[in-house]
Image (cartoon, rainbow, N blue to C red):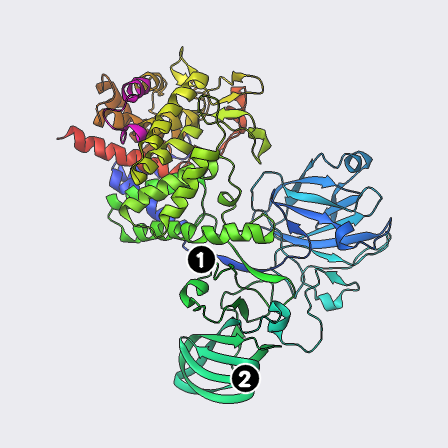
Amino acid sequence: MGYYFDDTKSIYAYEGTDVKAVMRSLAYRFMGQNLKHDLYYRAYTNNGIVRTTDYRYLVDFNKIFPESKDKDCVWAFTTLWAGPNGGGGAFDINCFGPMEFYINGELVYKSDIFKERYSETATRVSYTLKPGWNDIRFRWEKTKAGFGAQFGTWIGKWDLYMLMPSKERFGQEGLLFTELVDDQYVPEFEVGMSEKDFDKKLYPDIAFPADGKGQLTHMFGTPEGKYAMAWTKAFFDEMGTAKYTFRLKARGNTTVYLDDKEICSIDGGSCEFDVDVALGDHDIFVKSVCGGDWGFDLSIDNIELKSAARVKGTDDPWMYIGPFDADFEFPYDVACDMHHVVGEPKTYWRLNAKDTFVRPYNENTLYGRWNYPLGVTLYGLLHAAFMIESEDIKQYIKDHIQLCVDTLDYALWDKEQYGGATGIHNLLTSIDSLDDCGSFASTMLEVHKYLPIDGVKKVADYVGNFISNVMSRLPDGTFFRKELMHHFHNQTLWADDLYMSVPFLTRYYKFTGDIKYADDAANQFFGFKKLLYMPDKQIMSHVYDFKYDTMTGVPWGRGNGWVAFSLTELLAELPEDHPKRADLIEFLNEVCEGYLRLQDPDGMWHQVITDWESYPETSCTSMFIYAFSRGIRYGWLKNPEKYVKAVYKGWEAITKTSVDSDGNVYGVCRGSEFSFIPDYYKYELGWNLNDTHGTGIVMLGGIEVARLTEFLNK
């Protein structure tokens, strides 16, 4: 019986240690379980309860209802989704006054006089969700001290958002809330009910005044001579090509396009016209020019219009964008890929409702996301794709990274437009740590060498500026975590950050040709060594805590793996005559000696690398294999023979212990915090199946095994 699964279910039982076979299993399993989907689009109203820069919702009813009196109350309703096994999490709540929090009718949290008195102090409230949609509601009461709260994700930049629960707005981000009610009122509201059937007025109010004016006047005012575009789709269902009757009512100069062909233009008034249309989906655009009150209505006999972006939280089939100067040529391709802002000043699609816009959200679990574990995963996937000659996987990687690059400008605009919390690029738009940028940007540059990415320079420079000019440093230039949104990390230095910085700086040096980035990368190792190296064991502590001015002294497996891995990334590109090169090679030999002694008899390294009773940890095992193999191939390691044996022993152990016959990866420690005692790592910091901290690293480890074999057989 193996550690994680029966021996007969291992990839070794089917393929032995064959690297290509293992790569195929890992790569196709990952891509098959994380299919390529575009972004998700939701209606969003920017005049109610919204998330702010710390990704929590801000509720200030003194501003929303300035006429409110003591003891007035407001109820708010929203929903959270949980998968088939249910779920849970935690909110950090700051109460400005009395507050109650309910899930599925049960009281989860009720404030008291102490929570209300010390509103500057957050209270962490854990919650449990049932499978499916969960009914979330809040009650707030006004006092002289305040009226509302700030609540939401307990960890900075986590894009946790809630969805409105009424029939009309189901799927729109945010919360519905009542008008002012008395303190005895108890709402009879159910998820999915119509707002028309509820006994109180619900906010945010998105209805334009019933003044008879055109929808474009309500949305954009009356900017004389400027134009706006509207976009919808329709499926024409007659076989072959058939004639359809369009009916248009317009206020002002209006032109209708079917796909890229103009089919009607009028200067106000009404018209009816027939168009021959082939079976299938077609785009319909309307261009309207402002000459006073403006707007239009377009219908097609027996054809239902539908949202071009499948926008959730609205039944409006049209999206609108503008206004634009008359001489601005509307960029259909850019505007309609929904990944970019358009024009100057920049703008984006909106809906025919007050303060209501279209916003993109990445609801894929892994595809199209930017985070540091995915950076490592795609790095491994890239080289696995070349090894197994898979064009599909190469395209998948390229498309993933291209989506991230394409949407950064939009995300930065979104942050400024809506208050700080974005539905895409939550890390880069709120960047305050190396975790947010270095790993994925390094992979972006690696992929760009083989599969060119449009616009990569702008993103690389954005990350390069943060790392070189903004990230906190000690007086000697060493990176450390000074003040982050995730406060637990404040005033610490982590071994992990060598990977979060050095590979990017190395590739950015090659990308720009500026040696200062390689110099910076080299110097980091000496700063980290000074604070984390344990010379008696020749290994590294995980963290240095400046609050107590001491290293934690716990040698976490993956933290040490990052050190060896990153050192070889730099040495592979550092000029032969670099003044720090010899010292870096000496440091590599020191730590590799320490790591070599800690490989267990089966070939694995462990979660706490000095404690074989802790679980065999797959990601660090793969990284030590990677570093040893490179050290042998490049001639950096002294007495390479002993490392050769360790590489092959480690790879066999991974194929037997960590990867099953379906390409699933076991024994990868999840994302960590830190502790001064090893028991946290050993017992509390468990492993996840197919964790992205490990899948790509296993691929890279296997690829290095294959390269080593080729090298030794020359």
Query: In the image, which residues are magenta?
Result: 569-588
Left or right for 431, reference 111: left
Place of residue 273 in the rendered image (x, y in percent of width and height, measured from the top left): 48, 89
- Mark 2 lies on a secondary structure that is strand
Place of residue 131 in the rendered image (x, y in percent of width and height, measured from the top left): 60, 50
The quadrant where residue 354 appears:
bottom right
> Residue at left 38%, top 49%?
401
Which numbered disc, 2 or 1, marks the residue that appears first in the sequence?
A: 1
- 576 to 464, vertically: above or below: above
Amino acid type, callout 2: Leu
Place of residue 639 in the rendered image (x, y in percent of width and height, measured from the top left): 22, 16
**Residue tagged by mark 1?**
38
Left or right for 701, reference 481: left
**Residue tagged by mark 2?**
248
Of the 4 image quadrants, the one containing the N terminus is: top left
Amino acid type, callout 1: Asp
> Residue at left 53%, top 76%?
289
- How crowded is the residue under tag 1: few (<14 C-alpha within 10 Å), some, or many (20+)? some
Left or right for 618, reference 645: right
Place of residue 594 in the rendered image (x, y in percent of width and height, measured from the top left): 35, 16
Closer to the camera in the image, 513 or 596:
513
User: Residue 436 magenta-drawn?
Assistant: no
Mark 2 to mark 1 CA distance (whole Å): 32 Å
The quadrant where residue 467 appears:
top left
> Residue at left 79%, top 43%?
97
Residue 212 seen in render: yes
- 580 to 27, vertically: above or below: above
